[in-house]
């Protein structure tokens, strides 16, 4: 049970801070799709791949005071910031976590907007399709976001770059 919590804490130890619940969901999913051994199950949801398990684990880590969740009031929504606490680091230090080095991938993901990560994660969710079918599927399930051809090309390049990093 605690293995998956420790893997998430390892992620937060590398990420330092993650801003946004949606962004956190997409970062973990994209890493998982690049052979990082996160075990959360995902389903397709309104904002793309979503894991109820991840939501619950993050909530548990916050309740254990291993993660700090800061709620920031925005004009018409709440923004959440997550950082690992000293207690979380102490717990992680006592655990042997078998995880690859994901620092470069995390850095790449953190520089992306949640909108872009939603596109990338949606493309990965439908990766069993051809490139043309993925593009059609994204335009169907994400029609309101009006992704441009340039954004789609950039997302395909981004996925290729991450896959290259995960194979080294």
Image: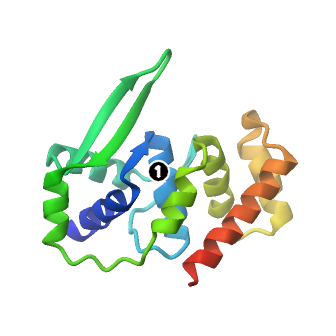
The tally of labels here is 1
The quarter of the picture where the C terminus appears is bottom right
**At 55% from the left edge and 69% from the top edge, which residue is drawn?**
33
* Residue 122 falls left or right of residue 54: right
**At 34% from the left edge and 43% from the top edge, which residue is drawn?**
82
**Percent position of residue 38, x then y:** 40, 68
Residue 43 in sight: no
**Percent position of residue 138, x then y:** 75, 50
* Residue 106 falls left or right of residue 156: left
Residue 105 in sight: yes
* Residue 117 falls left or right of residue 20: right
Q: Is 30 or 92 nearer to us in this picture?
A: 92
Label 1 sits on residue? 25
The quarter of the picture where the N terminus appears is bottom left
Tell me if mark 1 has few (under 14), some (14-19) or many (20+) residues whose alpha carbon lies within 10 angstroms of its own. many
Q: How has the structure been colored for display?
A: rainbow
**At 84% from the left edge and 50% from the top edge, which residue is drawn?**
150
Q: Residue furthest bottom?
A: 168
Q: For residue 88, what is the image quadrant?
A: bottom left
* Residue 47 falls left or right of residue 141: left
Mark 1, secondary structure of its residue? helix
Q: Is residue 124 above or below residue 34?
A: above
**Percent position of residue 66, x then y:** 19, 51
Q: For residue 94, what is the image quadrant?
A: bottom left
**Percent position of residue 107, x then y:** 51, 59
**At 33% from the left edge and 29% from the top edge, which residue is drawn?**
71
Q: Is 25 or 11 nearer to us in this picture?
A: 11
Q: Is residue 35 above or below residue 59?
A: below
């Amino acid at each position: 049970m605690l293995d998956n919590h420790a893997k998430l804490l390892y992620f937060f130890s590398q990420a330092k801070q993650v801003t946004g619940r949606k962004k956190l969901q997409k970062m973990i999913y994209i890493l998982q799709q690049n052979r990082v051994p996160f075990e959360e199950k995902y389903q397709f949801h309104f904002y793309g791949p979503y894991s109820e398990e991840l939501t619950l684990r993050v909530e548990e880590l916050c309740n254990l005071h291993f993660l700090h969740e800061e709620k920031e009031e925005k004009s018409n929504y709440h923004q959440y910031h997550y950082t690992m606490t000293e207690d979380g680091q102490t717990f992680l230090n006592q655990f042997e976590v078998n995880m690859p080095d994901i620092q470069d991938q995390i850095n790449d993901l953190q520089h992306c907007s949640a909108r872009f990560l939603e596109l990338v994660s949606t493309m990965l969710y439908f990766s069993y399709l051809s490139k043309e079918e993925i593009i059609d599927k994204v335009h169907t399930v994400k029609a309101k976001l009006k992704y441009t051809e340039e954004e789609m090309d950039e997302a395909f390049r981004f996925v290729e770059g991450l896959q290259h990093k995960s194979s080294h």
